[in-house]
Image (cartoon, helix red, strand yellow):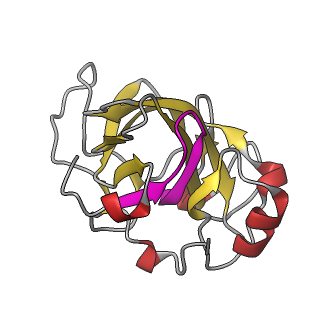
Amino acid sequence: MKPARGLVAAGVAVAILAGCSTGSEVRTDGPLVGAEGGTRVCVPSDPSVAVTFGSTLLYNNGSQRLTIDGMRLLDARNVTLVGGYLVPVEGTNLLGDGAPFPPSRPYVAIAGLAWDRRTTLAGASLSPGGEFAKAGSAAPMNLVIGLVSRTPAGGAAKGVQLSYHVGGQKYLATSTMGMAIRLRPDTCSDGGH
């Protein structure tokens, strides 16, 4: 499997929606952004084998440090989230999709990511311009998550939603990158989820 090529051409979507304006409300117009667009990625995998989805680029487009509070799958059917990391991008590649989760060193080496400087998603902090506070990197971050199918037929999610905060203000960022796992590659075009 080849890693995704190009930061902007990653085919990802962290679409920040227009939001409200009071400090106590959860807003959707925050500084956590990624490349525009949306698509659906489908990878073949055996049931109960965790699969990597790593084609989403994130960075902080604001003026203050932000902290990730958590992530949830959107409209998930027969898949379970088994892990999530932020990984500094040291070149022009993202990890890509389809490797076992967590990905092996050879797969990470091909992508050119700083896997040894990854951090778990919850509690990760990004400074303005993409600085990865826990890893000490000024690079944008590759969102790398692991999903496992709960059924032999496979499963899917329509994207992910990240919750985060800047100071006392809470935000949500929604990715429209759909993710599907199928037992057979020829069923990826089944028009499912």
User: What is the quadrant of the N terminus in the image?
Assistant: bottom right
Identify the residue at horizontal 75%, vertical 63% (top origin): 108
The answer to whether residue 122 is above or below residue 58 is above
Q: Picture coordinates of residue 169 (x, y %)?
A: 37, 28
The answer to whether residue 185 is above or below residue 77 is below
Q: Which residue is more in the foreground, 10 or 162?
A: 10
Identify the residue at horizontal 66%, vertical 45% (top origin): 101
Q: Could you tell whether 136 is left or right of 175 in the image?
A: right
Q: Could you tell whether 107 is left or right of 163 in the image?
A: right
Would residue 166 be seen by someone viewing this image from the given angle? no
Q: Which residue is more in the foreground, 23 or 104?
A: 104
Identify the residue at horizontal 45%, vertical 72% (top origin): 10
Residue at the limit of the structure toward the top, as seen here: 24
Identify the residue at horizontal 53%, vertical 80% (top origin): 6
Q: Which residue is more in the foreground, 65 or 175?
A: 175
The answer to whether residue 93 is above or below residue 157 is below
- Tell how many labels: 0
Asked if the stretch drawn in magenta spans residue 64, the answer is no
Prevalent SS, magenta region: strand
Would residue 51 be seen by someone viewing this image from the given angle? yes
Q: Picture coordinates of residue 54 (x, y %)?
A: 54, 57
Q: Which residue is more in the foreground, 30 or 40?
A: 40
Q: Picture coordinates of residue 156 (x, y %)?
A: 34, 42
* Magenta stretch bounds: 41-60
Residue 11's image quarter? Answer: bottom left
Q: Could you tell whether 28 is left or right of 65 in the image?
A: left
Asked if the stretch drawn in magenta spans residue 44, the answer is yes
Q: Picture coordinates of residue 183 (x, y %)?
A: 45, 49
